[in-house]
């Protein structure tokens, strides 16, 4: 077991997909309401889930290996 600081975004694998979502997938998206944002964000994350290169890049960037 290793001690991790309370907030370490470079070791948190969830930070990388969220950063990709904000900077690339939803960069120029202007939703009419929160429901539209929710549906679009879910669809973008589901599409990224099926891209092995995206998942591998998140693991590589975290440098946990």
Image (cartoon, helix red, strand yellow):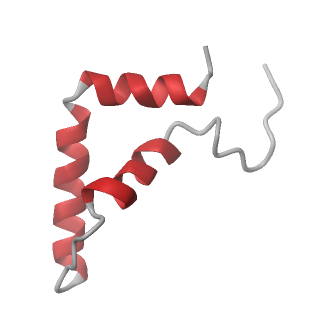
Residue 6 relative to residue 56: left or right: right
Which quadrant holds the C terminus?
A: top right
Horizontal and vertical percent position of residue 21:
34, 54
Residue shown at 52%/47% (left/top)? 15
Residue at the far top in the pictured view: 65
Residue at the far bottom in the pictured view: 32
Vertical placement of residue 37 versus 20, above or below: below
Quarter of the image for residue 26 reads: bottom left
Residue shown at 80%/23% (left/top)? 2
Vertical placement of residue 39 versus 46, above or below: below
Q: Nearer the viewer, residue 57 or 13?
A: 57
Quarter of the image for residue 58 reads: top left
Vertical placement of residue 1 versus 29, above or below: above
Which quadrant holds the N terminus?
A: top right
Residue 19 relative to residue 2: left or right: left
Residue 29 relative to residue 56: left or right: left
Horizontal and vertical percent position of residue 7:
73, 50
Residue shown at 27%/22% (left/top)? 52
Number of marks in the rendered image: 0
Horizontal and vertical percent position of residue 16:
47, 43
Quarter of the image for residue 31 reads: bottom left
Vertical placement of residue 42 versus 48, above or below: below
Residue 58 relative to residue 8: left or right: left
């Amino acid at each position: 077991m290793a001690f991790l600081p309370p907030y370490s975004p470079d070791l948190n694998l969830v930070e990388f997909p969220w950063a990709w979502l904000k900077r690339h997938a939803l960069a120029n998206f202007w939703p009419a309401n929160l429901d539209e944002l929710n549906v679009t964000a879910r669809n973008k994350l589901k599409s990224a889930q099926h891209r092995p290169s995206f998942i591998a890049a998140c693991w590589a960037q975290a440098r946990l290996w």
